[in-house]
Every structure is written in structure tokens, then in C-alpha cells.
Image: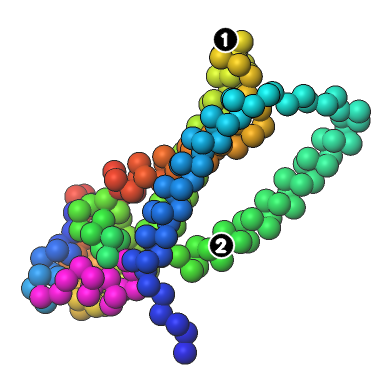
Amino acid sequence: MNNRLKVLRAERDWSQAELAVRLDVSRQAVNAIETGKHDPSLPLAFRLARLFDMQIEEIFDDGQ
Amino acid sequence: MAKAINRDRQLLKADISFALLGIVSIAGTFGEFAGSAEAIPEVAQPLLMTGIVVGLILILGAIISKVASIDRDHSEEYTFQLLSQGAVVGVMVTFVMNVLWFDIFLGRWLGELSADHLLTILMGGWAFGYYFHRIRGVA
């Protein structure tokens, strides 16, 4: 699944570690999501959407 | 106030644990092959033994399911997915090795596997599965 996490994070000038702390996940989890190695669960996707004040579909694209 | 969990450290602990598990698995497998094969005693009461085994599967399965749900609640989802995907690989490797050794008779040429061997194979398979998904991803 494609996502804009890296771009959104860069726009806010956050490191992966900073984003990880805000989401209560590991830095490796943030890295895995950004590189498409891990699809977040729905609760984590909602946390991301709330953090960036966006809709989930604006962050993630399942290519459909 | 609840103590904040260091998620990076949690994942690092898993990395170290599975590296050790892999090493123990390899060392244990060698040790088992180097030692003498264990004798398997005959089962006196097959029906009773079946009942005990089924009962233990149900009781232990329920307890471990409960413990796993606690573990899931306290782990971040990425770590838990790595652990569970690794466990699936470990169980399947053990199952297939069992079939290869006992049903396809690899044991005839390579020596029989003991119960302890199967445990070391499970540990090795789980460690391999963990690192395989750690590198390749769980998406």
C-alpha cells in the first residue's frame, strides 16, 4: 500500500523517531510503514489521520 | 500515571531474543545429534493418553491464547506481527520437517529425530521467520 507518510513527516520537519513517539510505536515501525514493509492497523491509521488532521484516504492509497 | 513504553527498546529486545534463539537452536540441534537417541516408551493405555493429550491441548491452548492477547495489548502491532509471522514459519517448518523425517523416511539415512530435535527446529524456524519478516516486511 502506498502512503504519503514520509512527505507529511518532512513537511512538519519531524524525524522518524519524533513521529514514532507521537504515535507510540517504534522508529522501526514508522520506517516499515514509510517503505511499504508494514501496513498499519485501522486504529493506527486513525491515529495517523488525527495527528496529521487528514482523512485516512489522503494518507494511504491502496491503488484501487 | 502509566509508565511510557520505549517501543524502540521493545523491538531491540525482540531482535536480541530471536538472535539468541537461533544460536540456541543450532547449538541444541548439534548437541542432540551428538548425544545418544532417546528410547520411546510404549504407551500402556492409548485411550487414556489420547484423552490426556486432548485435554492438555484445550487447557494450554486457552491459557496461551489469553496470555498472547495480553502480549498483543502490550506490544506495538509491528512487533507483534513480526512475532506471530515468525511463529507461523516456525510451526510450519517443524511440521514439514516432521513429515520429511518420519513419513518420507529421511531419518533412515540421516538418523532419527528426537522430541528435543523438534523443539530446536521450532526455535530455529521461529528465529528465521522473525528475521525474514524483519528484513522483507510484513505488509
Distance between mark 2 and mark 1 Cα atoms: 43 Å
- Residue mark closest to the camera, 2 vs 1: 1
Q: How is the image coloured?
A: rainbow
On the same chain: label 2 and label 1? yes
Q: Residue B108: x, y in percent?
A: 61, 10
Secondary structure of residue under mark 2: helix
On whether residue A23 falls in the magenta region, the answer is yes
The kind of residue tagged 2 is Ser
Q: Residues within 10 Å of mark 1 (few under 14, many from 20)?
A: few
Instruction: Count neighbours of disc 2 (C-alpha within 10 A) and say few if under 14, some if 14 to 19, many if 20 or more.
Output: few
Magenta range = A13-26
Q: In screen coordinates, is B56 left or right of B36? A: right
| Residue located at (16% from left, 71% from top) | A15
Q: Residue at x 24, y 78 (%)?
A: A51
Give residue B27's position: percent from left, percent from top. 51, 36
Question: Mark 1 highlights which residue?
Answer: B109
Q: Residue lying farthest top?
A: B109
Mark 1: which amino acid? Answer: Trp
Nearer-the-camera pick, B115 or A7:
B115
**Residue B60 horizontal side relative to residue B104, left or right:** right
Q: Earlier in the sequence, mark 2 or mark 1?
A: 2
Magenta-span inclusion, residue A50:
no
Name the residue furthest left: A11
Dividing the picture into quarters, in which one does residue A6 lie?
A: bottom left
Q: Are marks 2 and 1 in contact (CB under 8 Å)?
A: no
What residue do we see at 10% from left, 75% from top?
Answer: A13
Q: Which mark is residue B69?
A: 2
Say above or below: B25 vs A37.
above
Determine if residue B85 is in view: no
